[in-house]
Amino acid sequence: MKYKIVTSGTSKEVTLDRLSRSLRPQSEIYSIQKDGEVYLGLISNKALVIFATEFADYAIKNYAKRDLRIAEVCLSLTRRWIEDDSSVSKEELRTAASAAYAAANAAANAAANAAAYAADAAAYAAADYAAAYAADAANAADAAAYATGKDRDGEFIRQGEFILDFLRSGRHLFNI
């Protein structure tokens, strides 16, 4: 199945495995069906942070080869920001992201990188950077999957399915 993403008047078609790396703030997502298009929803900056956080959490739980407490702290702060964006400062998020990047580099662990990208996405949620960090989190989760011998395409498909489930559940309506 194909999907159409419309951002700032520009549209592009993507497959499920490209969805997580193709979103931008204010992207409208459509499912392309035989009899037309079905509108699925609008992606906010906060939704991009949610995606990055979930991709990182999955990577840590399923692909990390060692304990990544620093990355988990980073995700915890990001989740706190998702619940209330005034509860965590941009500086706190950036500090947590820097620590997770350092842990990832020291341990050669892409799962920790994914957590750092999630925190950066939250720190920059008001700007277009959130999309880049969310895509980076998707790619880092893929790299973590690959490092443990898992199917890369399978990871991107899993991410795409998560996004579609998120839109179908209506959660995006509360994260604008």
Image (cartoon, grey):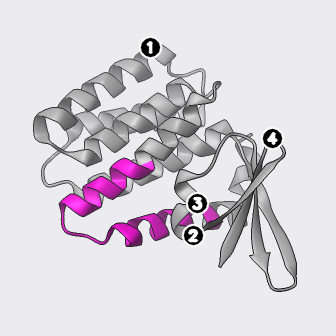
Kind of element beneath mark 2: helix
Residue 55 at x, y percent in the picture: 43, 53
Cα gap from disc 4 to disc 3, whole angstroms: 17 Å
Residue 45 figure quarter: top right
Q: Read off the magenta span.
A: 138-164
Disc 4 residue type? Ser
Q: Residues within 10 Å of mark 2 (few under 14, many from 20)?
A: some
Kind of element beneath mark 4: loop
Spot the residue most to the bottom.
Answer: 34
Q: Residues within 10 Å of mark 3 (few under 14, many from 20)?
A: many
Q: Residue at x 19, y 45 (%)?
A: 109
Locate residue 12 relative to residue 139 in the image: left or right: right
Disc 2 residue type? Leu
Cα gap from disc 1 to disc 2, whole angstroms: 34 Å
Locate residue 57 relative to residue 4 in the image: left or right: left
Q: Mark 1 or mark 2: which comes first in sequence? A: 2
Residue 116 figure quarter: top left
Q: Which residue is mark 2?
A: 16
Task: Confirm or deny contact between disc 1 and disc 2 (CB under 8 A).
Answer: no
Q: Which residue is mark 3?
A: 19
Residue 26 at x, y percent in the picture: 75, 42
Q: Which residue is mark 1?
A: 91
Q: In terms of depth relative to the viewer, which is nearer, 100 or 75?
A: 100
Cα gap from disc 2 to disc 3, whole angstroms: 5 Å
Kind of element beneath mark 3: helix
Cα gap from disc 1 to disc 4, whole angstroms: 30 Å
Q: Which residue is mark 4?
A: 8
